Amino acid sequence: MARDEPSAAAVDVADGDSPSSSPTLTRLREALAVLSEAFESGDTASSDAAAAAVAEILSPSDADASAALSEQMLREVHAFLSRPSSNQMAIDALSLELPKPVAKLGARMGNCRDIARAIIEFFASNCSPRDMLCILCEALDTPVAFNGSAYLVILLDGLASRILTKENYAYFSGMEGVHARDMLHTCRLFFLLINIIWI
């Protein structure tokens, strides 16, 4: 998957622009609007492309990118997801694409971590537990060079607090080939160890 141009966020900061007026944030808003319109019109091909475009814009390719811009982009995504009028199919499409870039942005400074956690928890609470388990585990397997421990904590927090719960135990027990009890204990232990390291 392509990545956003490394210089985009840096140019915003260098020019003294506020995050709310940044070209990157404008592109994100436009991509979210296209995604919403695509699902409302039933255009599946366009909706898939739009979800991928949102993920591409959010994908951080510059470790020195503005934390303020990262925070604003995450707030924009969270506001989009939280709207009462948000289409469930749009939410499902974004849940497939966004956990990795959202967690990477969340590993940055400021309030990014809390907002990223809120987005991951929203997906975990509003999408299929089985799908989110696979999506988050795949994201956990992705190497991250920049603040990797924070990236792992954000994803594991979503797994432990919303997916690997007693309420979902019966659901996962019915999944063929999945040892739910072992998986539950292993992930919770991993989450505990990461938090100890992080503290």
Image (tube, rainbow, N blue to C red):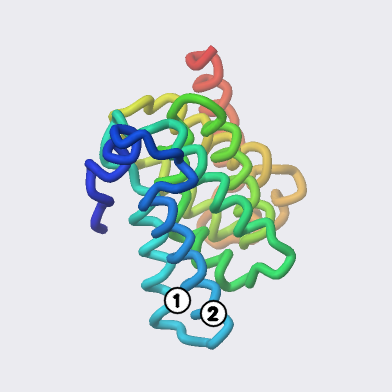
Distance, label 1 to label 2, CA atoms, is: 6 Å
The outermost residue toward the front is: 16
- Which residue bears the numbered disc 2? 39
Query: Pointer 2: residues within 10 angstroms few (<14), some, or many (20+)?
Result: many
**Residue at 48% from the left image edge and 60% from the top image edge:** 29
The location of residue 55, given as percent across then percent down, is: 39, 56
User: Tag 2 or tag 1, which sits nearer the N-term?
Assistant: 2
Tag 1 near tag 2, CB within 8 Å = yes
> Residue 29 — which label?
none
Which of 87 and 25 lies nearest the eye of the viewer? 25
- Provide the secondary structure element on which disc 1 rests: helix
- Which amino acid does the dot numbered 2 rest on? Phe
| Residue 157 placement: quadrant | top right
Quadrant into which the C terminus falls: top right
Task: Name the image quarter holding residue 80.
Answer: bottom right
Counting labels gives 2
Kindly identify the residue that appears in the image at 56 percent across and 66 percent down: 92
Please say whether residue 44 is visible from this viewpoint.
yes
Disc 1: which residue: 47
- Mark 2 lies on a secondary structure that is helix
Residue at 54% across, 53% down: 77
Does the image show residue 182?
no
* Residue 107 pos. (x, y %): 44, 30
